[in-house]
């Protein structure tokens, strides 16, 4: 299905730069042109004069593909997810959409009990090739429009979980997700979309990225070393990849070379890449925007602690949001989301104390 | 075997299916009492006319969705009884290879999605199946079974509304057996009939005697015609009654004895047998032969299931992902 990695055009192979929104939209339209079975389902995604979904990802697609394939739904998240699963079992490849990831809780039964388990309960006779796209991340919208939800879904057997940090990965992973024969929860970080320009909440992160014109897919389960380093491994996803890279630049000025690994997909997870790096640097930290307790980082810490026990010189440290709902006030939200400063301080402490 | 008017062969076939449903449940009941089956079971004796009447209006390629009480639906849809019995015995020859069990009977290739044991959980799935049929230009329909209890869960509203606004080829079938577990429908619903709720979605709502198999067939036939011709869903309410408790351990003390007795007077299998013999469609001898052949089929199914291999323990690790 996917090309060998050596044949995947590198991001820098093209001078063209796109936002995440443009890259995702291109992935959708390429896959819709390629495969008639791909349809989109969601709220406000194809309304003429509307906004192309909450973050403009589907803008213009109804004009190209028509309302038969870009299907506007009522505000009915449980049915959106369940109809997508039923249509997938019936031979389509639906890409469903919720406006904010927080609304996935409404759809949780359909995702966790139906989509994820139909194949298993049928003894392997059914495939459910659907994608559920969901924006995550805190952006001064408070507790119900800013959560990071990855851990809820990594815990459910039968669901794959993708979480791109840049336009290049976003496009390549979304195309892979659409061609995957399993349900995929596809998390997109709101501050990385670029649909509203470089937002100051993003902390000066470059939202444009190189995206080759030539078609490519990025396989699931292959983490990327976003920055090589010898002194400590920092594993992150989504926005936290960027914060970790910023931290690594500051650490480098202090003589500490941090290796930053972008997991790209959480299910399947590239255990080999993280274990290899951790064995090499002998120190590991995980950065996630989710609440600390039971986050995906806890699983990484437990597994790497197990398989790399003798190779580590320091405890595995997690930098995550505190165990509170997402606050609204910008001053509180800045405290809540792992900051570059916290990442720097944690890495420095691990390197200097052990 | 579908037609708006039924011929003798079709009627005899429907009667045999009903007897098969009934005797299957009787066997299963005793197999459980004898400790030969693991888990629990939600039985459907008393609801055969609903299952068979609905499925008799379906054609190849149509898909049903079912509930935690799926035995009669699976039999009525024509899944091999051996594969159903083997699934209850948790054998690798079961329709779900031992991974589903009583509450998830099904085989999509044979027109039944694995039954969904979350109340109301199958309503969006059936709607999605119907969306696929419509999109792919197939003439098939989805038939979505659920109970009166599901009429009060959110997916009922969300999914039926979607089916309605998109004119999907789906029939929503509420088997109103008067109780959600031990709770009487009167306690949890202000309207008299679930079918009244169809008005909220702008689709027809019809209440039918769910113990009259030919009445169910006719109502389902009209609903399928409507669905197949692009006119959209129907909400069909079939009034029926389960003769057993909610699940294996439930003696059903919450139901008045007189009520149970009154419904047993309207036993759908007995009613249909009497109707067919009264009308001279079946002789008593032919009816007896049907009973005998069903017993034999079930005997063979139990033997097949018992002699089938168990799955390997580590088979639990496969089929998570495609």
Image (cartoon, coloured by chain):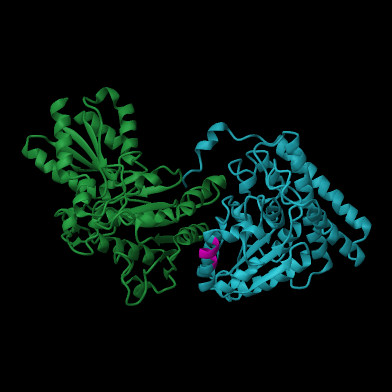
In percent of width and height, residue A48 lies at 35, 77
Task: Tell me: residue B318, above or below residue A102.
Answer: above
Where residue B4 sits, quadrant-wise, is bottom right
Q: Quadrant of the N terminus of chain B?
A: bottom right
Where residue B296 sits, quadrant-wise, is top right
Q: Which residues are magenta?
A: B156-160
Does residue B303 appear anywhere in the picture?
no
Instruction: Please tell me which residue lies in front, B206 or B282.
Output: B206
In percent of width and height, residue B33 lies at 75, 36
Q: Does residue B166 show up magenta in the picture? A: no
Q: Residue at x 54, y 36 (%)?
A: B315
Q: Residue at x 14, y 42 (%)?
A: A341
Instruction: Please tell me which residue lies in front, A138 or A170.
Output: A138
Q: Residue at x 69, y 40 (%)?
A: B249
User: From the viewer's perspective, is B4 left or right of A193?
Assistant: right
Task: Tell me: residue A239, above or below residue A296.
Answer: below
The tint chain B carries is cyan
Chain in green (letter):
A
Total count of labels: 0
User: From the viewer's perspective, is A70 left or right of B267?
Assistant: left
Instruction: Please tell me which residue lies in front, B153 or B121.
Output: B153
In percent of width and height, residue A264 lies at 29, 47
Magenta portion: prevailing SS class = helix
């Amino acid at each position: 299905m996917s090309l060998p990695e050596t044949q995947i055009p590198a991001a820098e192979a093209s001078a063209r730069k796109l936002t995440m929104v443009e890259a995702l939209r291109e992935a959708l339209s390429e896959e819709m042109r390629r495969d008639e079975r791909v349809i989109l389902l969601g709220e406000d995604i194809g309304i003429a004069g509307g906004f192309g979904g909450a973050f403009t990802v589907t803008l213009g697609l109804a004009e190209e593909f028509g309302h038969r394939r870009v299907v506007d739904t009522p505000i009915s998240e449980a049915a959106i997810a369940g109809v997508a699963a039923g249509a997938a079992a019936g031979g389509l490849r639906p890409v469903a959409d919720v406006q904010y990831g927080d609304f996935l809780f409404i759809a949780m039964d359909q995702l966790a009990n139906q989509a994820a388990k139909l194949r298993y309960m049928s003894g392997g006779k059914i495939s459910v090739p659907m994608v559920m796209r969901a924006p995550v991340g805190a952006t001064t919208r408070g507790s119900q429009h800013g959560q990071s939800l990855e851990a809820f879904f990594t815990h459910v057997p039968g669901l794959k979980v993708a979480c791109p940090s840049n336009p290049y990965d976003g496009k390549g992973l979304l195309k892979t997700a659409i061609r995957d024969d399993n349900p995929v929860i596809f998390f997109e970080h709101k501050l990385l979309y670029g649909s509203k320009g470089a937002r100051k909440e993003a902390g000066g992160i470059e939202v444009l990225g190189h995206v080759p014109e030539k078609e490519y897919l990025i396989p699931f389960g292959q983490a990327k070393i976003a920055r090589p380093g010898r002194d400590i491994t920092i594993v992150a996803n989504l926005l936290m990849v960027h914060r970790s890279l910023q931290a690594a630049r500051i650490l480098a000025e202090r003589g500490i070379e941090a290796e930053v690994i972008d997991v790209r997909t959480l299910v399947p997870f590239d255990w080999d890449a993280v274990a290899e790096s951790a064995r090499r640097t002998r120190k590991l930290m995980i950065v996630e925007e989710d609440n600390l307790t039971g986050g995906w980082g806890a699983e990484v810490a437990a597994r790497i602690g197990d398989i790399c026990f003798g190779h580590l010189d320091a405890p595995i440290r997690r930098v995550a949001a505190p165990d509170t709902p997402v606050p609204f006030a910008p001053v509180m939200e800045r405290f809540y989301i792992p900051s570059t400063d916290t990442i720097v301080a944690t890495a420095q402490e691990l390197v200097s104390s052990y | 075997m579908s037609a708006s008017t039924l011929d003798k062969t079709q009627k005899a076939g429907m009667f045999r299916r009903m007897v098969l449903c009934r005797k299957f449940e009787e066997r299963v009941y005793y197999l459980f009492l004898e400790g030969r089956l693991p888990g629990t079971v939600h039985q459907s004796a008393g609801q055969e006319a609903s299952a068979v009447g609905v499925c008799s209006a379906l054609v190849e390629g149509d898909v049903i969705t079912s509930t935690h009480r799926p035995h009669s639906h699976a039999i009525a849809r024509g899944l091999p009884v051996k594969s159903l019995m083997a699934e209850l015995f948790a054998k690798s020859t079961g329709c779900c290879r031992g991974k589903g069990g009583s509450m998830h009977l099904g085989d999509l290739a044979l027109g039944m999605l694995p039954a969904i044991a979350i109340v109301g959980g199958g309503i969006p799935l059936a709607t999605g199946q119907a969306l696929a049929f419509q999109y792919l230009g197939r003439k098939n329909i989805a038939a979505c079974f659920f109970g009166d209890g599901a009429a009060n869960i959110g997916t009922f509203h969300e999914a039926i509304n979607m089916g309605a606004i998109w004119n999907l080829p789906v029939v929503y079938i509420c088997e109103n057996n008067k109780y959600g577990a031990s709770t009487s429908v009167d306690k949890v619903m202000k309207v008299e009939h679930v079918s009244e709720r169809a008005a909220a979605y702008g689709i027809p709502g019809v209440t039918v005697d769910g113990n009259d198999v030919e009445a169910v067939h006719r109502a389902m036939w009209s609903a399928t015609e409507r669905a197949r011709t692009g006119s959209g869903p129907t909400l069909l309410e079939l009034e029926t009654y389960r003769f057993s408790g909610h699940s294996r351990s439930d003696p059903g003390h919450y139901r008045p004895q007189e009520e149970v007795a009154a419904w047993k007077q309207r036993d759908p299998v007995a009613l249909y047998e009497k109707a067919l013999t009264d009308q001279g469609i079946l002789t008593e001898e032919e009816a007896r032969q049907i009973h005998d052949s069903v017993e034999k089929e079930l005997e063979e199914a139990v033997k097949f299931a018992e002699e089938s291999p168990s799955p390997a323990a580590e088979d639990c690790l496969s089929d998570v992902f495609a």
